Image (cartoon, coloured by chain):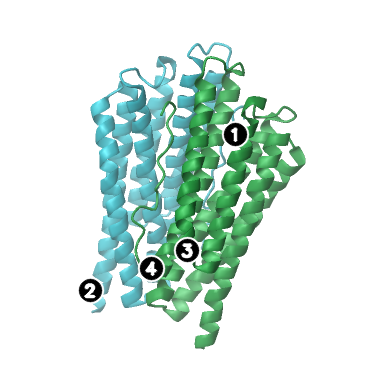
Chain colours: A cyan, B green
Amino acid sequence: MRTTYRKQLDDVLEDLVSLSDIVAVAVRKSTRALLEANIKLAEEVIAGDETVDAAKTELEQQLFSLLARQAPVASELRLVVASLRMVSELERMGDLAAHVAKVARLRYPEPAVPAALLPNFTRMGEVAESMVVRAGQTLSQSNVDAAEELRRQDEEMDDLRRSQFKVMLGPEWPHGVESAVDVALLGRYYERISDHAASLASRVVYIVTGEFPEDDDWPQPVGGSS
Amino acid sequence: MRTTYRKQLDDVLEDLVSLSDIVAVAVRKSTRALLEANIKLAEEVIAGDETVDAAKTELEQQLFSLLARQAPVASELRLVVASLRMVSELERMGDLAAHVAKVARLRYPEPAVPAALLPNFTRMGEVAESMVVRAGQTLSQSNVDAAEELRRQDEEMDDLRRSQFKVMLGPEWPHGVESAVDVALLGRYYERISDHAASLASRVVYIVTGEFPEDDDWPQPVGGSS
């Protein structure tokens, strides 16, 4: 019985790591869809979000059933409680990747991002994907140190977003209001993916150390002219 | 022992309802700060967000301790699990109210919202506040029917956001890029408050009926030209 229980917990962890892989791929594809105005990839990410949602529901049910049948305590209870939260974070990251893909689809066949901002969004996509992958590794390896690296990456994301505002609000923005609105919202979606990845890692710290994260919403929103 | 346990659960519920009241006030004040370019109110909401964060941490700890010590089952376990999620939703709504206040502060002494969009944002604020209040009532009264009304309000919020895009992307938008970016992000913040309120109510349905909500992220993002 005991073995089965531990195995169930391990399975949940493995499923969470798999889900983080799926989300990382969604982030990569949605970024490519955006940068290349690739409608096929955009549709793929949008349709694929159902898989993420289904995995979330399935995992929530497993975790609930673990709580109900096994009444875990101490570190195992922490693991279950943190997993409930992590599964929500992953599902939201999937949603946000789908939001990015929807903007790409909305503007197709035009690109949603002006050429001048392609390097910026390329980097945003890289950072976001790497953060999701790292959050997944943090989880699979119970690696507390990686949380620090995620915090650094989250700062890079904020810097990228500030650069976007600088370009958009500078005197030489020839792309008009619609494009600026797209960029502002896209930037917000990437920023939120980054926030969720950092928050997910802070849950791992909680599982391992038993300390509630001091602040699991570290990141401040990046304001228009800040 | 049993009585104490039930009392602890009731206390948590009461605290969640109180937290929803605090968040509703934050939403109201941040909207006023925005519409009236009222820096004092904006600062109040921003500083007050710490209270929401502290209440969240406190409630999470109580819920964890309930799980660890009482190993609840069936409907009481559902209540605890749903409460964990609801406390996150409320904390996020508080963050979003603070984001609105930060935009008001950033543009002060200028108003962040052009006069033409004041009625729209006034209504957004009313709908958002009413949704938070209703979500709180749904919780305190275990009222499943209110979830339906929240869905309707969430649709009104989406319509309001579509109107904003129409105005911003119309030929007669004289307010430039910066203002459009502010409006796009502010609209997104209100939309997310609305999403969280609807999601919170769907958790109540889950507590009462034991059915996982079919889709607790009902709302679709409102795209630029949709």
Q: Which residue is mark 3?
A: B84
Crowding around mark 2 (Cα neighbors within 10 Å: few <14, some 14 to 19, many 20+) is: few
Q: Residue at x 42, y 51 (%)?
A: A200
User: Could you tell me which quadrant the C terminus of chain B lies in?
Assistant: top left
Crowd band around label 4 with a 10 angstrom C-alpha radius: few (<14), some (14–19), many (20+): few
Query: What type is the residue that disc 2 sits on?
Result: Thr
Q: Secondary structure at mark 1?
A: helix
Helix, strand or loop at label 3? It is helix
Q: Which residue is denoted by mark 1 in the rendering?
A: B120
Residue B54: image quadrant is bottom right
Which of the numbered marks, if any, corresponds to residue B209? Answer: 4
In front here: A225 or B23?
B23
The residue carrying mark 2 is A4
Looking at marks 3 and 4 on the same chain, the residue that comes earlier in the sequence is marked by 3
Name above or below for residue A115 compared with residue B55: above
Residue B7: give x, y in percent of width and height. Answer: 56, 80
Could you give the CA–CA distance between mark 3 and mark 1, rounded to whole angstroms?
33 Å
Going by the numbered disc 4, the residue's amino acid type is Thr
Distance between the alpha carbons at the discs numbered 2 and 1:
56 Å
Distance in Å between CA atoms under marks 2 and 4 = 29 Å
